[in-house]
Image: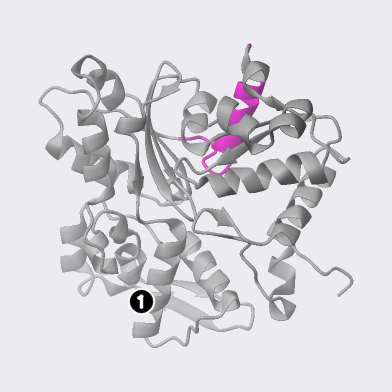
Amino acid sequence: MDQTHYLNNEIASNWEDLIFSYPKINCQSLNQEEVEIIWERAFLEGIGEFPNRRDLILTEDLLAPLSSSAFYAELAFESFNISRFMTTSVAPLSLYAAGKVTGVSVHGGDLTTTICSVFDGIILPLQTKRFEVSGRQLTDYLTRLMTERGYNFMSSSRDFEFAKRIKESLCYVSPYIQNDRKNKRLLREFYEKSFDLPDGERITLGDERFRCPEAMFNPAVLGKNDEGIHDVLSTCIKNVDMSMRRQMYSNILISGGVAEFDGFEERLSIELSKSSPERAPINIETSSKPEISSWLGATVLGEAPGTRAHMVSKAEYEEEGFRAVQRKCL
């Protein structure tokens, strides 16, 4: 191979020769060299040049540690000579992309799932929570389920990527989980779907297809003593001022990886209606482009009047260091 690093769609045709690496774990970037490579490729392929003296808006997990923002600020100013820098949360950006400034964003990421309440463009921190089941945990769970089914999935990064692709292709959320549990044996052919690995092996799943994402609604299957995502969402909405609740119930937006599961929106609506006040209109929408909704929201934010006033200039960073980022962005 001529290349030493492969990203995104380049991976599919080079499965056999690759070792997979994850430079970001538990919301923290651990490998500066790998992150820098990703940024270089993104800039060169996205805008055709290094972003010298350009502005940069970076999306972060809402509850990411300060050390993560410090890492990115240093990289932006010292390695890429950014003119102005701003870090902002992923979750509300999906709302902005949908033309909303008030509502609840349910954003399912690879490392964390965030339920973020926003009113008039402002994040409500006491009504915002991290849900402790993420895309990566669901992939781990599916790996376990496939192993129980008799497939030989090891703990290598390569097998993890296979499991992730299988999850994205075959899994769905059951709107009526009890019915599916009863019918899975009677309608076996209906539930079973297959995925072909690059080496020709065929992976066939049955009830694992809905058992995997069911962990979002029942984290106990992962050994977690946590509420389901519908309960956390309900708590966030009930914690806002009573005068805002109807707006929150009627403006719920799903984005990120969870939005890709067929049935997720319907199931979330069913479960939420069980705990919502009578006559509260529940309206749940899925982002039209869930995987890039935060990026689309960032473009809206970047063009908004006053955004530059909240960005850190290179001169401010050189004078104050990371304190300037804390003062203006966090």
Quarter assignment of residue 226:
bottom left
Asked whether 41 falls inside the magenta stretch, the response is: no
Residues 230 and 282: in front is: 230
Is residue 304 visible in this depiction of the protein? no
Whether residue 315 sits left or right of residue 264 in the image: it is: right
Residues 116 and 327: in front is: 327
Asked whether 300 falls inside the magenta stretch, the response is: yes
Query: Which residue has dot 1 on it?
Result: 145
Query: Image height check: is 294 above or below 262?
Result: above
Q: Position of residue 326 (x, y in %)?
A: 57, 32
Residues 76 and 99: in front is: 76
Quarter of the N terminus within the rendering: bottom right
Q: Position of residue 137 (x, y in %)?
A: 41, 64
Q: Position of residue 264 (x, y in %)?
A: 34, 47
State the residue at coordinates (23%, 21%): 245
Tell me which segment is drawn in magenta: 287-305
Q: Amino acid at mark 1?
A: Leu
Query: Image height check: is 227 above or below 220?
Result: above
